[in-house]
């Protein structure tokens, strides 16, 4: 009798615990904002910081802009560089281009750009000027964000442009991108 009581108690406890976990997981998205990036039609936040070798500024858009979010320590950003170069070469007449980073270590940034130069202006955001949510959304690298002249997101690709993201970007811009080789992907 005692063993049957223990088994019944253990089963009841397990069912109660699994029920609580199930209800908690179902409520989680409503309780915590789990978005890791911006969505189409979202306004980009006001980005304050400075241009790479310049004074404090606020990033503004006067025409459609491609914003490339990167980090000097991001291996995928290095692998995605050829896509950025090709995109800029093909679309510079139609879009402004800016590379955005939250990494304000100027020596690290200068070293990275000397080794992996990019043909676009680099804007360093001030982390303390962003909300926690915006810091998280701009922390995912690489990202390619297309915004209209009012600063609203038109299209976004999170991650290096290869496979499905490469195909989507090629269709959107009407160009061919080099992608990322399988050898390079496997090295990450």
Image (cartoon, rainbow, N blue to C red):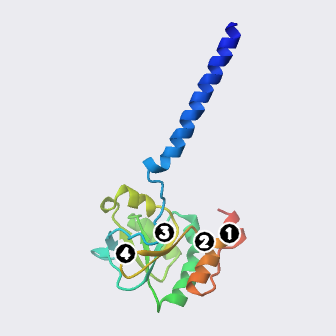
Q: In the picture, residue 11 is in which quadrant?
A: top right
Q: Residue at x 39, y 61 (%)?
A: 134
Residue 52, numbered circle: 4
Q: CA distance from mark 4 to mark 1?
A: 29 Å
Nearer to us: label 3 or label 4: 3
Q: Secondary structure at mark 1?
A: helix
Q: The N terminus is located in which quarter?
A: top right
**Horizontal and vertical percent position of residue 157:** 54, 71
Residue found at the far right of this picture: 183
What crowding class fits label 1: few (fewer than 14 Cα within 10 Å), some (14-19), or many (20 or more)?
few
Q: CA distance from mark 3 to mark 4?
A: 14 Å
Compare marks 1 and 3 and give the one earlier in the sequence.
3
**Horizontal and vertical percent position of residue 165:** 61, 72
Residue found at the far top of this picture: 1
Which residue is tagged 1? 184
**Horizontal and vertical percent position of residue 35:** 48, 58
Q: In the picture, residue 17 is in which quadrant?
A: top right
Would residue 2 be found to the left or right of residue 52 on screen? right
Which residue is tagged 3? 70
Closer to the camera in the image, 182 or 138: 138
Compare marks 2 and 3 and give the one earlier in the sequence.
3
Q: Residue at x 57, y 71 (%)?
A: 78
């Amino acid at each position: 009798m005692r063993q049957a009581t223990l088994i019944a108690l253990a089963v009841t406890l397990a069912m109660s615990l699994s029920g609580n976990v199930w209800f908690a997981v179902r409520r989680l998205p409503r309780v915590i904002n789990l978005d890791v990036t911006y969505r189409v039609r979202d306004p980009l936040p006001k980005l304050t910081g400075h241009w790479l070798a310049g004074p404090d500024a606020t990033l503004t858009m006067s025409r459609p802009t491609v914003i490339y979010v990167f980090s000097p320590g991001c291996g995928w950003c290095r692998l995605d560089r050829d896509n950025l170069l090709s995109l800029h070469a093909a679309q510079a007449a139609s879009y402004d281009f800016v590379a955005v980073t939250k990494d304000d270590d100027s020596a690290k940034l200068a070293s990275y750009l000397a080794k992996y130069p990019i043909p676009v202006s680099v804007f360093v955001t001030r982390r303390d000027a962003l909300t926690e949510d915006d810091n998280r959304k701009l922390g995912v690298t690489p990202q390619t964000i297309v915004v209209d002249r009012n600063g609203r997101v038109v299209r976004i690709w999170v991650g290096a442009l290869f496979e499905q993201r490469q195909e989507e970007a090629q269709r959107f811009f009407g160009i061919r991108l080099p992608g990322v080789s399988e050898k390079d992907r496997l090295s990450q």
